[in-house]
Image (tube, rainbow, N blue to C red):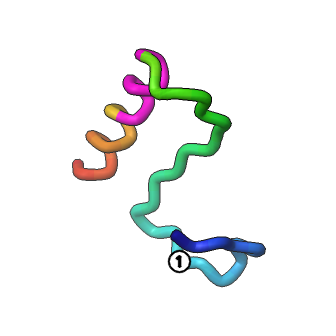
């Protein structure tokens, strides 16, 4: 895991990101994670 304080120096090509406060992995969160995983591997 990386702790970042700035995104200015990052290479963000082909990067997918989700930000949120996940209080558990219910069906809505599972759908978001599935979509991100599918798109990231496409």
Q: Give the magenta-colored segment's residue range.
A: 27-33
40, 34: nearer the viewer: 34
Q: Is residue 41 left or right of residue 33?
A: left
User: Which residue is farthest right?
Assistant: 5
Query: x, y (%) of residue 38?
Result: 27, 40
By secondary structure, the bulk of the magenta-drawn segment is best described as helix
User: Which residue is farthest bottom?
Assistant: 9
- Mark 1 sits on what residue? 11
User: Which residue is farthest left?
Assistant: 42
Query: x, y (%) of residue 7?
Result: 69, 72
| Image height of 23 relative to 37, above or below | above
Q: Residues within 10 Å of mark 1 (few under 14, many from 20)?
A: few
Whether residue 22 is in magenta: the answer is: no
Residue shown at the point (51%, 69%) measured from the top left:
1
Whether residue 31 is in magenta: the answer is: yes
Q: Secondary structure at mark 1?
A: loop
38, 2: nearer the viewer: 2
| Image height of 5 relative to 26, above or below | below
User: Which residue is farthest top?
Assistant: 27
Query: x, y (%) of residue 20?
Result: 65, 38
Residue shown at the point (45%, 68%) measured from the top left:
13
Residue shown at the point (68%, 73%) measured from the top left:
4
Query: x, y (%) of residue 26?
Result: 46, 19
| Image height of 38 relative to 30, above or below | below
């Amino acid at each position: 895991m990386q702790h970042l304080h700035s995104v200015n120096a990052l290479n963000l090509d082909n990067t997918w990101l989700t930000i949120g406060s996940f209080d558990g992995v219910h069906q809505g969160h599972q759908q978001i994670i599935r979509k991100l995983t599918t798109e990231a591997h496409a």
